[in-house]
Structure formats: C-alpha cells, structure tokens
Image: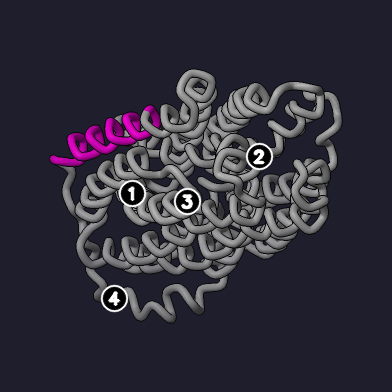
Amino acid sequence: MALCASRALIAFNFIVYPACLAVLQREWEMSATAAGSVASAFHIGYGASLLVSSWLADRLGARNVFRVSAFASAIAIVLFALFARSYASALLLYALVAVAQGGTYTTAIMLVADRYEPRRRGTAMGWFLGASSLGYASALLVTGFALPLGGYPLAFWLTAAATVGGCAVALFILHATPNKIHPRAGNGRFRDAVLLNRDAMLLVAGYTAHSWELLGMWAWTPAFLAAAIAASGAAALTAAEFGAYLTAGLHLTGLVAAGSMGHMSDRFGRRAVLIAMAGTGAACSLAFGWMVASPIWLVVALGCVYSFTGIGDSPVLSTALTEAVAPAHLGTALALRSMLGFGAGAMAPLAFGAVLDATNAADTTPTLWGWAFMALGIGGLIATACAWKFKGAKGI
C-alpha cells in the first residue's frame, strides 16, 4: 500500500502539463501542433528512460534503479516548477522530468512481480497501476483549484510538492527491501526468451498500440473537455478549470478500472479481459471526438467508459508479460516494450495536434475533434487484434 501511495504522488508530474494545456496554449501562443510536441517530448524522454532503466534493472536490481530514479524525479520536477515559463523552456524541462521519472515505472512492476504469485498478481498489479490514476485525478483537482488562484505557476508548484513527497515515501519504504538480481543461467538468450516468444511479442505489440491510444487521449482530453464546456458559453479560464475537474473524474474511473480488471483477469483469464477492454476502448475513440457539441453529461458519460477501458487493460498487459517471460529477462523485455510503446505514445499527442490543425481553420479555437480522436482509435483496433491472437500462459 505504501508503494501505491508513492506511485500516486509521483504520478502528479505526468498530468500537470495536460491539465494546464487549455491555459498554456493561449498564454504561450502555441499552435495545437506545438502544444502536442511538449507532451510528445515528455513521452520520448519517458520511453528512453524506461528503456535504459529496465535494462539496468536486470543487471543492478529493480530496487536500486527505482530509488535513484525517485531521487532524480524530485529534483527534475522542482526545476520544472521554477523555470518552465514558455514553450521552449517547457519542452526541455518537461522532457527532463520524464527522463527522471521513467525509472520508477517498470522497476516497480518488477518489484510487484517478485512479491506476488501469479494467481494474485493481476489484482496486485491492478491496484499499483490504479494508484497512478488516483495521482492523475488528484493532480487535475489540484490544478483546477490552482488555476483561478495563481495561474499555471501555482499549479506547477503544488504538483511538484506532491511529487517530492511521493519520492520521499518511496525512498523510505524501499530502504529495507531486498535488491533481487535474477540469475540468467538456464533461461536462454533474449532472442529465444522474448523475440521468438509469440505471446510475449503479441503483448508488446498490444501495449504499443494501447500506448498510442491512451497517451494521446490523456494528453488532449482536458483540452477537449474544456472545448466542450466552452461550447456551452463558459469563459476560457472557467472552461479550463472545469475541464480539469471533469478529467479528474475520468481518471478516478481509471482507478476503479485498473483495480477491478486486474482482479477480473485473475478470475476469468488475461485474454478475455484484454479483448473486452481493447475493443470497447477502440469504439470510444471512434466516437468521442464527434461529441464536442453534445450535452456535457453525455460527453462525460462516454468519457467515463473511454477512461475505464483505456486504463483497464494496463495491469493485465503488464501482468501477462511477467508470466510470459522468464524473470531474468523481464527487465529487458519491459525495455523493449517501453521503447516501442512510449515511442508510439510520444507520437500520438503530436499526431493528434497535427490532425486537429489540419481539420480546423488556422488561428481559431478547434471545434472539430472527431478526426483527431479517430486517429487514436487505430491503436485500439490493433490492440484488439493482438488480444484476440494472444493465448495466455498457464490457463490465465
């Protein structure tokens, strides 16, 4: 539970930029493409960090890599809060935050896998990853509170304080945790253990497509909801504030999804849950953006389903990979997954912004969002196909 609490607080820095995006785009005079590029820079840095830290975790131990990354995350988010005051500074510093934070993700998955046996692992992984959704929701609530009081600088500082607190908790609770390094003898080569492992590669491909859809949705949903509220006649700052609050509610839905779907996969199998989540999420991507002018209650209702399905397969994908790959190669397998998944996820916000610019008149507030969300739906369709072909390990 303490690791979940730490994860929730560290997750604040993942969402602070998207939460402020509707305000930042206006104050920093960014096009949708430029705004998306900041989120893309974060995901590129995060993916690179995941790649390196996961590879190191096989060799140095997950606990050691996690603790170093937590310490670096605290420093990086303070620098972001201090100096991010323009497009260029945010592009650089938000990427730095991502590089520091990346080492706290896959290493934590490895720590959970080491602690829990397969029949309980889905539930444990679900609550750990669900803690991220709690952190995202909390960050959005804090941002919604901060924007009318002190603008985006106050939002940056409050989320930074939470992240520093989470890092301190992580350093404390892992002090006495053993640092395990699994022996490679008898586990074969990486090529045989991962690259020629059909289920492992289907999970990697499914995660890559899932990341495209999920990270693009996370980056732009606050701005989309602000646009939906503004369409009803609200002022820009008020729309941004309530957009943050509504998106926080969607992330709380994600918290329930991660916890419940991890448990459901323990009971009914990984494959069944993956198919249900990916298929429903793809349908939501294809429909969500066309509802910008719909009644806000209807937008939020579909948004809750979208958020639930978007995050619901995350713990199942991670749990299934820990079962499909030998422990000695798990870090490297997660590194491959991270490189491909966050590479795709890094491009999604940028591609979304480019489609948004291409389908709306220049120098105007976007009113047509459907095509951009449909571009995310391509990932959902691919993830569904991968889940359908996945067989699962040991009957789960």
Closer-to-camera residue (19/195): 19
Give, as a three-letter code, the residue at label 1: Thr
Residue where numbered disc 4 is placed: 186
Q: Which residue is drawn at the image coordinates 48% and 18% (left, top)?
A: 149
Residue where numbered disc 1 is placed: 104
Say which quadrant the N terminus sits in: top left
Q: Which residue is drawn at the image coordinates 34% and 62% (left, top)?
A: 54
Q: Residue furthest left?
A: 176
| Crowding at mark 2 (Cα within 10 Å: few <14, some 14-19, many 20+) | many
User: Which region of the structure is painted magenta?
Assistant: 158-175
For marks 3 and 1 on the same chain, the one whose residue lies earlier in the sequence: 1
Residue where numbered disc 2 is placed: 221
Image coordinates of residue 23 in percent, x first then y, are 59, 35
Q: Label 1 to label 2, Cα distance in Å? A: 25 Å
For marks 4 and 3 on the same chain, the one whose residue lies earlier in the sequence: 4
Local secondary structure at mark 2? helix
Q: Label 4 to label 2, Cα distance in Å? A: 47 Å
Q: Quick check: can you spot residue 395?
A: yes
| Crowding at mark 3 (Cα within 10 Å: few <14, some 14-19, many 20+) | many
